[in-house]
Image: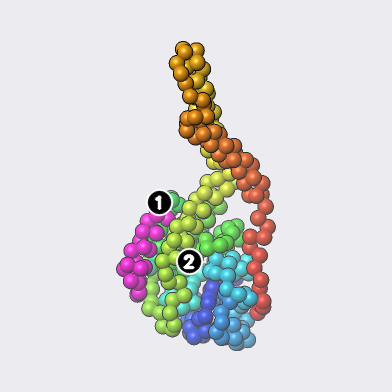
């Protein structure tokens, strides 16, 4: 199979027939063998009924239905598990991503040798500067700096193409869909490209991804991913290092305070008790915290070896 198109969706019943017809026209025009995998992320409208209707008409249409809303990353994870195409294309279901971009994305993977190609929406059709455009630019700039993928301008673009090996060797969980290029790079797939893509205005309903909380969550996810990619397999390196430094400084401080007390006694100078100075308690606290950091490193090492239930999602039905 040439192409698998994975489409996560939530309450997009109105746009699905038009999106499917558009994809089908492109695939038949280019003579691609393909499948379209719709992942219904707990929709409360008629999205699943529409998907089942499309499946009855065309066996190339497949569907996965979650019992409840999990989010975009779990939807992509389950779609990736089912995908069989040599090239996997992801896009949003709201008709803002153009299926006409698929042939060029496919050729960039198959002919130009990229592992992953991310779309770049240079001319967005919507976006309030204060609540969306400016935060998006800041977010992408930070993501480029942290990830080291300096050629990507739009990490959060839903329209992407992947070599099959990429999606079978990365784990998308939580809300990490924003950072799939970073995940791919950490897995050794560093041939990452970008393609300017056409962005259309939404035709039906309203965006399901609005509000400042998604930018806050995005930065928190980026910090998490950076930490996991740097220390995920060796948490003792960071916690043990911090713990050792804090314990050492506290221990040295206690010795200095004790030395000062001994010097005062030997010189006949009146001196307060060691416990009368706040520096003794600061030093003692540093030693305790250092020990706790060190033990945290051991516990983190044990926890990092067991994550079997991280991607356990309840699927109600499949077609």
Residue named by callout 1: 145
Residue 247 sits above or below residue 267 on the image: below
Identify the image quadrant of the C terminus.
bottom right
Q: Residue furthest front?
A: 270
Nearer the observer: mark 2 or 1; the answer is 1
Neighbours of disc 2 within 10 Å: few (<14), some (14-19), many (20+): many
Residue at the extreme left of the image, as rendered: 129
Percent x, y for residue 62?
61, 78
Q: Secondary structure at mark 1?
A: helix
Residue for badge 2: 160
Q: Is residue 34 visible?
A: no
Residue under the image location 52 percent in, 80 percent down: 11
Residue shown at the point (52%, 63%) measured from the top left? 175
Is residue 253 something that shows in the picture? yes
Q: Which residues are magenta?
A: 122-144
Q: Quadrant of the N terminus?
A: bottom right
Badge 1: residue crowd in 10 Å (few <14, some 14–19, many ≥20):
few
Q: Which residue is nearer to you in this view: 299 or 281?
A: 281
Percent position of residue 104, x then y: 44, 68
Callout 2: SS: strand
What secondary structure is the magenta-colored segment mainly? helix
| Viewer-proximal residue among 283 and 18 | 283
**CA separation, marks 2 and 1?**
21 Å
């Amino acid at each position: 199979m040439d192409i698998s198109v994975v489409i996560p969706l939530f309450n997009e019943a109105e746009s699905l027939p038009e999106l499917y017809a558009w994809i089908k026209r492109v695939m038949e025009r280019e003579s691609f063998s393909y499948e379209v995998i719709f992942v219904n992320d707990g929709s409360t409208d008629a999205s699943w009924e529409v998907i089942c209707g499309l499946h009855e008409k065309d066996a190339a249409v497949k569907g996965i239905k979650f019992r409840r809303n999990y989010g975009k990353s779990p939807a992509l994870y389950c779609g990736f598990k089912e995908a069989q195409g040599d090239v996997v294309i992801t896009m949003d279901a709201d008709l803002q991503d153009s299926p006409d971009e698929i042939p060029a994305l496919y050729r960039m993977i198959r002919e130009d040798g990229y592992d992953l190609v991310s779309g770049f929406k240079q001319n967005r059709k919507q976006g309030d500067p204060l609540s969306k455009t400016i935060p998006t630019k800041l977010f992408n700039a930070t993501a480029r700096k942290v990830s080291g993928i300096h050629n990507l301008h739009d990490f959060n673009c839903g329209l992407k193409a992947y070599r099959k090996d990429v999606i079978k060797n990365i784990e998308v969980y939580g809300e990490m869909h924003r950072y799939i290029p970073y995940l791919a790079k950490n897995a050794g797939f560093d041939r990452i490209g970008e393609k300017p893509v056409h962005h259309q205005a939404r035709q039906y309903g309203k965006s399901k991804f609005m509000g400042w909380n998604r930018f806050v969550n995005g930065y928190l996810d980026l910090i998490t991913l950076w930490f996991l990619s740097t220390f995920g397999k060796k948490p003792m390196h960071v916690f043990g290092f911090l713990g050792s430094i804090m314990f050492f400084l506290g221990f040295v401080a206690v010795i200095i305070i004790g030395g000062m007390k001994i010097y005062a006694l030997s010189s006949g100078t009146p001196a307060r008790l060691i416990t009368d100075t706040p520096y003794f308690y600061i030093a003692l606290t540093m030693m305790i915290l250092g020990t706790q950091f060190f033990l945290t490193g051991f516990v983190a090492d044990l926890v990092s070896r067991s994550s079997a239930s991280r991607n356990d999602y309840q699927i109600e039905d499949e077609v």
